[in-house]
Structure formats: structure tokens, C-alpha cells
Amino acid sequence: MENPVTWEALLARPGPLLALAPMQDVTDLGFWRLIRRYGGADLYFTEYFRVYPGSVLNKHVLKSILQNPTGWPVVAQMIGNDIPALVRTARELQQYPIAAVDLNLGCPAPVVYRKSAGGGLLRHPALVDAILGALREAVTTRLSVKTRLGFDSPAVFEKLLAVFARHRLDLLTVHGRTVREGYHSEVHYEYIARAVAEVRCPVLANGNIYSPQKAREVLDLTGARGLMIGRAAIRNPWLFEQIRQQERGETPTLPTGRDVLAYVHDLYATACDPQIAERSQVQRMKKYMNYLALAVEPSGRFLHGIRRVASRADFFRLCEEFLNHDEPLPLHPFRLNLPAADLLAGEHC
């Protein structure tokens, strides 16, 4: 494990702070190691630690902290609503090499929000206030929050900003959609700009940042200190370095089809356990390929084809068909004609 850059050194660096978003069952230690080879982020958030009475730290997630291969600071994210359990877990996490403890107020998965955790907490601002008050007392390192604008309406966002300001957060990440909007709507960047104006801590803008050009547009619109990128980094692991190139006044380097094909091979080797059945390996890869396939070609043939393969041979045969070329790929998502209920319908970055 490299010695991570300190938080102070990170914030003192010129240019936007670039964070890899926490994505459950995706941004694990292996993915961190992989994306670091393609340029990587400046700040890494763990998959969330599920917190409830009697919970213990997930060893799989903890491994990302203990074996951090990136050389950059790590933020440990928690999800839950039980105040004593959250306080206990925050204190325990601070025994490990982390830069901050983060509270998840944004997860839009129904299985999470129905339990009044993640984005579900946004329906209860008073409980958010109580949780952050208790955590602020327990956290002697930095305290951060990742939030959405509200549960079904951003009308509550002003109240949330007052809560965040009261508890002296060290970092705030704002995904510019409500929980109900999921990933299907446009991002309301004006609310992120409001957060930048009203809280004292650095703010990261999150949502639909899919290219270096869009990154600069969002930074200009919001005034944010940096960006958090999730799904777009699965599709384009070069994106963090492309943003840095643009900020230095350079033309961002585009991968060729063969570069992307090599990344798919790397991703397969990283994500798939050779001890599990081949069909299960291929199914796991589809979770990643859903996002990558949006940006390979505009007809949707690659996306529809990759969703139907069942064997490793067929998987890579299809990838070879569409990616074995030397043409540059911007890896910007195409607006494919998908049914409204499709996982990928709408905006997906």
C-alpha cells in the first residue's frame, strides 16, 4: 500500500478535486486498483458499510481501506439510521487509515430507502439533524455527507443545507437529482450551485458528468470545488485523466477501440472470480457493460447483444466485433431508443 496523499495536500492542489463515487458491489479494491492504472481519481469513497444495531464492519469493504492501492485518501461511507450504531461504527472506522467518515443520504435503491436509510432519510430532516449532531461529536477526523436534493421534491433542500451548515461538515457531495428521479432525469445543477454558496466546506458536484467538456461546464455552472464521477468512470476509466488534460490546456487523449477492448479484458479479469461458474461471470460483467455499451455505437446492437450472451467466448466475440479497431472512441453515451422502463433509459452518468 502506498502512503496516501494527505487531505491538506489534496485540497491545496490546483484544479478540481476528482472523486470516484461509491458504487455498491462495483467500486471495490479490485476496481480501485484497475482504475488507478488508467489515471484514477484523487479521492476514493468506499462501498457503504451497512450500519444497524449489532452490525460489524464488512471485511470485504474494509479491505479497500487496509490495502488502499491508490496513493490517495479514502473516505469510509456508512448507510443506516440508528444513531447509536452509526456513532459506534464511526468511532470504529476512525481506527483505520481513513481521511473522513461519510454519511450516505442519497442511495435511491428502493430496498434501501424503504428502510429510511440512504435517500430515504431525506424524508426526515429532523432525524438527519440528530444523526449529524451525534456524528459531529463522535468524529474527530473529517465528516462528510453525500446527498441528493430531496426524496420526491427539492423543496426540502434549503432545510437540508441549513442542517449541513450547522454541523460543520468538512465535505459535501451533492447529486443534483431527487431520490424519485433516480438516474432518469436531467441533473439540476442550480441546486448544487446553491449548496456551494451556502455551506462553508468544499462541495463536490455529482451527476451526469460524462466527458471533459461536461466536467468544465458543470464546474462553471456550480462553482464546485470538484466532481464526483461514478457510472461514467465504469464506461470510460480514462475520464479522470482526460479532465486533468483539459484543465492543463491539453487536448484530451481518446482511447481507440482496441484500447477499450483491452480495458474490457482487464475488467473481466478484475471483476470475475475464476472459481465461480462461467455463466455467472458473464452475468456479472453485464453490470459494467450496460454502461460501456451505451457509448460504443448508436444503434443499440452492441448493448442488446451483450445483454444476451451467456458464455465467455460469445462475450468476447461480440466485443471483438465492435471494438477491434483503431478508431478513437469519445465514449460519450448515445441516446439509444430504449423503453422508458429500461434500466438505461434517460440520463445515465
Image (cartoon, rainbow, N blue to C red):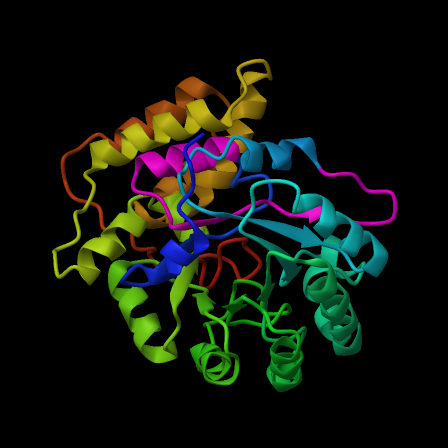
Q: Position of residue 256 (x, y in %)?
A: 19, 38
* Residue at figure coordinates x 62%, y 76% from the top left: 164
Q: Position of residue 136 (x, y in %)?
A: 69, 66
Quadrant of the frame with the N terminus: top left
Q: Position of residue 236 (x, y in %)?
A: 33, 46
Q: Is residue 196 above or below residue 24?
A: below
For this orientation, the residue located farthest to the right is 53
Q: Position of residue 314 (x, y in %)?
A: 41, 22
Pick the front one: 97 or 224: 97
Q: Is residue 320 above or below residue 292?
A: above
Position of 116 compared to 246: left or right? right
Does the rendering let one see residue 335? no
Pick the front one: 340 or 197: 197
Q: Which residues are magenta?
A: 29-57
Residue 266 shown in magenta: no
Pick the front one: 114 or 201: 201
* Residue at figure coordinates x 41%, y 30% from the top left: 267
Pick the front one: 311 or 35: 35
How many discs appear?
A: 0
Quadrant of the frame with the C terminus: bottom left
User: Which quadrant holds residue 220?
Assistant: bottom left
* Residue at figure coordinates x 40%, y 62% from the top left: 227
* Residue at figure coordinates x 43%, y 47% from the top left: 291
For this orientation, the residue located farthest to the top is 275
Residue 46 shown in magenta: yes
Q: Is residue 63 above or below residue 328?
A: above
Does the rendering let one see residue 339? yes
